[in-house]
Amino acid sequence: MKKTLFDEQDFAELSPLFKGVKGKLLAGAIMRLLALNKINRVFAKVCHLRNHAFTEGWLRELGVKYKVENEEVLEQFREGAFVTVSNHPYGFMDGMILLNIIAGKRPDYRFMVNSILMKLYPLHDIFIAVKPTTTKSGSSVENTTGLKNTLRHLKAGGAVGFFPAGAVSNYNENRWKATDREWQTTVIRVVQMAGVPVIPIYIGGRNSLFFHFLGRINWQLRSVRLSREILNKHKRVVNIRVGEPILWDEMKEFESTEKLAAYLREKTYALAK
């Protein structure tokens, strides 16, 4: 069982630049720069755990705590299909927190993720992978297998979580705070096809100002910083607010997927108030 999330071998598989003695030294230097060695040490302590036990251990080792408001809404859904939609202020940590809250009540709670996160093997049973592929024209399309598996899980009475933005929140100059970009319609179409209740969940907080400063320069620089953002939440209490369920009878009135996506995003951010 591999006890690291990222190591020199992973870098070597990414590029020939990291092969050989010099390449291994370069990979090691980058790992130290990005604090991947520290993340590996945390992972090694909990990699023997699975699913909810893993998220519990991960958050404990990082010293991250959370407070949930209106959690009783989730008690109404001990059975039956539903979807959660959430803002995405921190990145990886958002998923760990939501999985820890909901999978403890609903072991069949699944999360749609980019296939790159399947490296996190303790959560294989919870993740539904979606791998972006490219058409001949160069446009990006979603992996239909992942979407079909998600819909199948909902039709069977399961529960699924989404971050409809598909990316971590950006700093919004007009609103003077970090917010999601417009929510993508791909996952909202799944909601429409399933016809199940949606529970909006707002996650309070943001990443560091330096993280968002890097984002103003280049999104790739900001992405590199994400590994360190995982580690700087020590002793932070994340406020979570669960909204009232939005039933299908209300959602089916929307004439377009785009309008429904905007509505669900608005209902989620309204919880911040």
Image (spheres, rainbow, N blue to C red):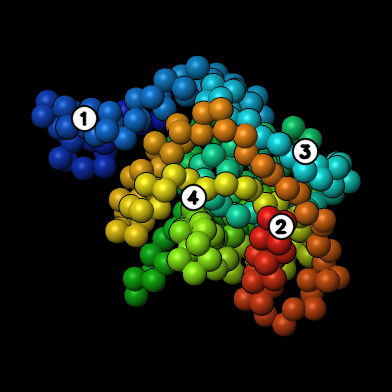
> Residue 170 appears at what percent x and percent y?
46, 58
Q: Are marks 2 and 4 in contact (CB under 8 Å)?
A: no
Q: Which residue, given by chain and number where applicable, does mark 4 sit on?
A: 114
Give the mark, 2 or 4, whose residue is nearer the N terminus.
Answer: 4
Where, by quadrant of the figure, is residue 86 drawn?
bottom right
Residue located at (80% from left, 42% from top)? 71
Q: Residues within 10 Å of mark 1 (few under 14, many from 20)?
A: few
Q: Which mark is residue 29?
A: 1
Residue 113 point in image, percent of width and height: 54, 48
Looking at the image, is 126 positioned above or below residue 82? above
SS category of the residue bearing label 2: loop
Q: CA distance from mark 2 to mark 3?
A: 28 Å
Q: CA distance from mark 2 to mark 4?
A: 31 Å
Q: Which residue is mark 2?
A: 273
The reply to whether callout 1 and callout 4 are in contact (CB within 8 Å) is no
Q: Amino acid at mark 3?
A: Arg
Sequence order check: which comes first, mark 2 or mark 3?
3
Residue 208: x and y in percent read 44, 44
Residue at position x 33%, y 52% from top?
A: 214
| In this view, the mark in front (1 or 2) | 2
Per the rendering, the mark at residue 106 is 3
In the rendered image, the vertical position of residue 3 relative to residue 206, given as above or below = above
Q: Is residue 111 left or right of residue 247?
A: left
Q: Quadrant of the N terminus?
A: top left
Sort mark 2 into few (<14), some (14-19) or many (20+) by Cα contacts within 10 Å: few
Dot 2 amino acid type? Lys
The amino acid pointed to by label 1 is: Ala
